[in-house]
Image (cartoon, helix red, strand yellow):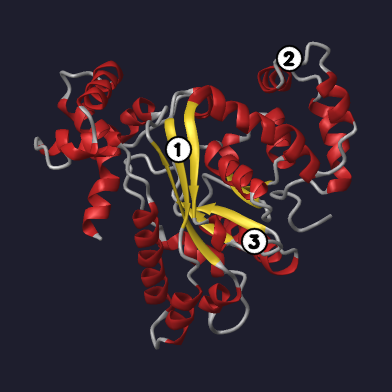
Amino acid sequence: MSQFDSIRPFYDAEVNAAIREIVDDTMLDAMMQFTFPEDQSKSWKERMKHTHSLRDFQINFIYPAVKKVLEMSSEGLTLGGFEQLEPNTAYLFISNHRDIILDTSLLNASLYENGLVMTTSAIGDNLIKKPFLQILSRLNRNFAIKRGVTGRALLESSLLVSQFIHKSLLRENRSVWTAQREGRTKDGNDLTQKGVLKMLTLAEKGSNPFGFFDKIQLVPVSISYEYDPTDSLKIPELIAKSKEEIYVKGENEDFITLLSGIMGSKKRIHIQVNKILTEEVRQLKKEDLPQNEKLSKLSDLIDREIWKGYKLWPSNYIAYDLLQQKSQFASQYTEVEKASFEKRLSQKVNQKNPLEVENFLQMYAHPVVNQLEL
């Protein structure tokens, strides 16, 4: 028994048995029909039954599925900053988080295409309650973050995750992806939670836990979608939050959001690998400050890199101008693009509810606000 058995991806030795558990599942069949529409004989099943490693599963089945999603639901993916990354080198990617599955899947597809180390990626265990999804996520090299725990259980869970991340980066030379905050950013305002950074240091031995960041290569990543296919699904939670009410998710809400994020229209997508924060971390480590202050400064640094690297689309500028009732960024979009966005707004939210309209626009406008702050 490994100490990480409750959260880790499968070992290669376990891959084939895990695949055989789900190879006849109707959900996998639908996924592969989508990925390989010409494969009438379902020869993917035989190929899958002869798969014995996580890498082979990711490259031969997950990667083509991601490419198909891009083809069917977007107008293309562009990349920036990947030339900074070295082959055979592990990085800790801390990213803004918009889509449950695609953020990490698109990053990994891009790392693979650039000959770089793919990540082991954090996923909330609330998203993988169904046995099929749990097996699929472990085959896709995800590790589970326990949600809904408090007190001592939360501390123990956080320490375990921290230890797993340390092992991946420092002993296995495996890159790690984690979001800058717990869960997705619903309002478009990408802010790093200090608690996430604190969790990363828990497994560090000695009197200076911040020293962990000096041992690794920390890379903020910005991912931006021109249209968020789950934008209207986020509105009820945002309104509840604005009214300081507790929001209770529907029974299948996460699953519906997951599917909408994958198949809904996104238009253009951009992933920007920002500056590797080696020098900044080294400088912070030297400063005579309490750990909490160092973590606050580091979270600010990460925020600024993510904001700076965020690709602003016409949808962002239009939302900002509509919210401000100005034409400050009219040069950044056409009248056709504005009409298209306004049509989306009218279809997605109740125009008679100012709170719905405001929250929808803020979701797209926040990245502009953040860049203006820079």
- Which residue is at a point 34% across and 33% down the rendered structure image? 237
Q: Earlier in the sequence, mark 1 or mark 2?
A: 2
Amino acid residing under circle 2: Glu
Position in image of residue 185 (x %, y %): 39, 44
Q: Residue furthest top?
A: 40
Q: Is residue 335 left or right of residue 43?
A: left
**Quarter of the image that includes the C terminus:** bottom left
- The answer for how far apart the CA atoms under marks 3 and 2 are is 39 Å
Amino acid residing under circle 3: Ile
- The answer for how far apart the CA atoms under marks 3 and 1 are is 28 Å
Amino acid residing under circle 1: Ile
Residue for badge 2? 38
Q: Residues within 10 Å of mark 2 (few under 14, many from 20)?
A: few
> Looking at this view, is 1 or 316 the one in front?
316
* Foreground label between 3 and 2: 2
Which label is found at residue 269? 1
Q: Earlier in the sequence, mark 3 or mark 1?
A: 3
